[in-house]
Image (cartoon, helix red, strand yellow):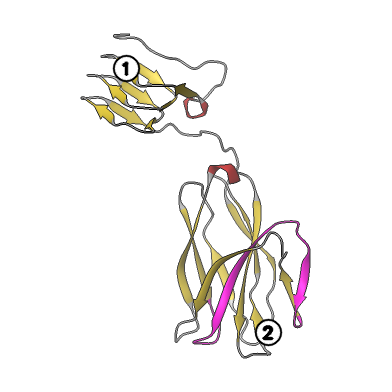
């Protein structure tokens, strides 16, 4: 209704409140709304209305008229994103793997340095707690059923590979993954990077 408002109480956060609408949603003039609107069709935000949350229309448009939408802080993930070194690498010219904290809704930049130039390699992501094996004489955090290949690459002339990105999904909040690079020096010789333990969060 005109000039109405929605408040959250008892420690609730607007980012955690979802309003599911089976058709279209309209906020009248001057409405101060909190929460995420998820409408099947369209969403109309009338003159002077405001939303602390999101306006998501599946099949129609989101129409605004001197209204505002602000994404609230918090919202679902109370885990801080972090990266720690878990284990050293091994092999010739051991590559060094680095990663920025994997923040949900953003991308984490990965950099590999110190490897041999113009060599083929992979970066693996494995759920933390999976069994570690051996690759040649190097320990490898790899599980055949759950490991994902994040990136295939060819190292640069300097032996580096930079600016790879990992997309993040909110459903992964708080999960922990190990990242490790494997570089093939020749058919029988490999270099394995250090292992990073990454916690996905905000």
In the picture provided, is 89 more to the left or to the right than 28?
right
Q: Which residue is mark 2?
A: 91
Q: Residue at x 65, y 71 (%)?
A: 194
Alpha carbons under labels 2 and 1: distance apart: 62 Å
Q: Is residue 77 magenta?
A: no
Query: Residue 60's quadrant in the figure?
Result: top left
Is mark 2 in CB contact (under 8 Å) with mark 1? no
- Where is residue 63 drawn, in percent x and y? 25, 28
Label 2 SS: loop
**Figure check: 125 above or below 17:** below
Query: Residue 21's quadrant in the figure?
Result: top left
**Figure check: 145 above or below 173:** below
Which segment is the magenta one?
Answer: 113-137
Which mark sits nearer the N-terminus, 2 or 1?
1
In the picture provided, is 148 more to the left or to the right than 164?
right
How many discs mark residues in the rendered view? 2
- Where is residue 178 drawn, in percent x and y? 66, 61
Q: Residue at x 45, y 15 (%)?
A: 7
Q: Is residue 126 magenta?
A: yes
* Mark 2 Cα shell of 10 Å, populated few (<14), some (14-19), many (≥20): some
Label 1 SS: strand
Viewer-side residue, 57 vs 65: 57
Q: Residue at x 64, y 82 (%)?
A: 191
Viewer-side residue, 85 vs 75: 75
Q: Residue at x 69, y 80 (%)?
A: 90
Q: Which residue is mark 1?
A: 27
In the picture provided, is 200 more to the left or to the right than 137?
left
- Where is residue 172 drawn, in percent x and y? 59, 46
In the picture provided, is 27 more to the left or to the right than 180?
left
């Amino acid at each position: 209704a005109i000039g109405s408002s929605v408040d959250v109480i008892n420690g609730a956060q607007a980012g955690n409140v979802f309003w599911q609408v089976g058709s279209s949603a309209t906020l009248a003039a001057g409405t101060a709304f909190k929460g995420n609107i998820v409408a099947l069709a369209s969403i109309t935000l009338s003159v002077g209305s405001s939303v602390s949350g999101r306006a998501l229309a599946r099949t129609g448009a989101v129409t605004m008229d001197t209204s505002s939408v602000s994404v609230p802080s918090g919202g679902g993930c109370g885990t801080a994103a972090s990266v720690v070194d878990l284990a050293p690498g091994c092999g010739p010219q051991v590559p060094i793997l680095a990663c920025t904290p994997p923040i949900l809704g953003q991308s984490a930049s990965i950099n590999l340095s110190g490897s041999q130039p113009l060599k083929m390699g992979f970066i693996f992501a494995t759920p933390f707690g999976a069994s570690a094996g051996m690759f040649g004489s190097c320990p490898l955090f790899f599980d055949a059923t759950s490991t994902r290949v994040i990136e295939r690459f060819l190292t640069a002339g300097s032996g580096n590979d930079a600016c790879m990105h990992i997309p993040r999904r909110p459903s992964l909040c708080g999960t922990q993954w190990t990242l490790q690079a494997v570089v093939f020096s020749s058919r029988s010789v490999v270099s394995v990077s250090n292992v990073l333990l990454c916690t996905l969060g905000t």
